[in-house]
Amino acid sequence: MSPTKDQLWTIRRLIQWGSDWLGRRGIENPRLDVELLLADTLALTRMDLFLDMDRPLGPQELGAFKSRIKRRSQREPVAYIVGVRGFWQHDFQVDNSVLIPRPETETLVDSVLSLYPQVDTNLKILDLGIGSGAILLSLLTEFPNAVGVGVDISEDAIKIAEINRDKFKLEGRATLIVGDITSQLSIDTKFNLIVSNPPYIVSNELDKLQPEVKDKEPRLALDGGKDGLDIYRPLIPHAYKLLESSGWLVVEVGYDQGQTVPDLFKQAGFKDVSVVKDYGQRDRVVKGIK
């Protein structure tokens, strides 16, 4: 049975129906997804839903919710449906032109904060492959005296990053550029810190990923080539040239790249190279100093 405008559909009833409907279609966390989609449809928090479970939906609300449930059943990620994803301390606008920010990527932000405990440090930051802007803009909110440059080959990604930059009132501190992150950019300055979350998934592993990832997220932001290192090989020596003396390069890596990427750091001349584990105790970040 699906919801129709001729029936009285309360929040409670829709949560039960939607959870069952998505669950039968192989969605991993159907109730959570339904609650997120319903809360966003009604401009409420999830807690608001629980406090008013017997509230009925009007026809327009019901139609909007049904449309979103259908999109989720087709494996479109919730973040793309609602248009935002929480990362660090902010909600970032996202669409299918950018990778959805992951909790494990917060390990990179945390690693940078451990390198620069004085938050009033005057940093010049470069983010290679900025995507939605989650990493660079989070760092700029943490370091009020820092300025940054973000680069991405995708014009659409840069547009999303610009929306987020302006949302957080960082227009005067973040410059965004369309360009190949591994080429010699026309950047006159050198940086104290370079960060990157490049594509690192092995090409022949992509089709084994969940449909939400392999079919809906931008392949350009996922595909790391035959061994997952296609971007790291030119990026790491390129970053070395763009860094000031004593500057840091901090990158995200795949869980199985905690040996190979540090070797590339060392070959490029970086010192004090180390690997940081994420909250799940998997290798996630590699850092080194020039």
Image: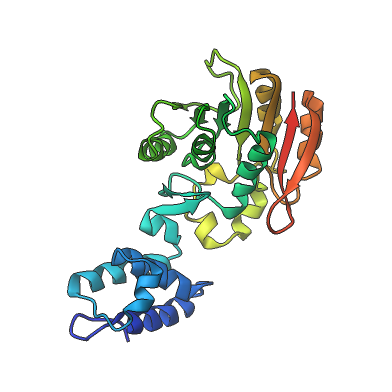
- Residue at x-position 79% and y-position 23%: 269
Identify which residue, 71 or 141, lies in the foreground: 141
Whether residue 48 appears in this view of the structure is yes
Q: Quadrant of residue 53?
A: bottom left
Residue 11 in percent (x, y) is at 32, 79
Point out the image quarter for the C terminus: top right
Taking 194 as reference, is 259 above or below it?
below
Identify which residue, 145 or 27, lies in the foreground: 145
Residue 245 in percent (x, y) is at 71, 18
- Residue at x-position 55% and y-position 43%: 221
Q: Is residue 221 left or right of residue 73?
A: right
Point out the image quarter for the N terminus: bottom left
- Residue at x-position 52% and y-position 36%: 136
Taking 85 as reference, is 18 above or below it?
below
Colouring scheme, one of rainbow, by chain, secondary structure, one colour: rainbow
Q: Is residue 33 left or right of residue 66?
A: right
Q: Quadrant of residue 126?
A: top right
How many numbered discs, if any? 0
Residue 132 in percent (x, y) is at 46, 42
Taking 55 as reference, is 106 above or below it?
above
Identify which residue, 128 or 170, lies in the foreground: 170
Single out the residue that lies furthest toward the top.
188
Whether residue 73 appears in this view of the structure is no
Residue 67 in percent (x, y) is at 30, 67
Taking 53 as reference, is 189 above or below it?
above
- Residue at x-position 21% and y-position 86%: 7
Q: Is residue 196 left or right of residue 46?
A: right
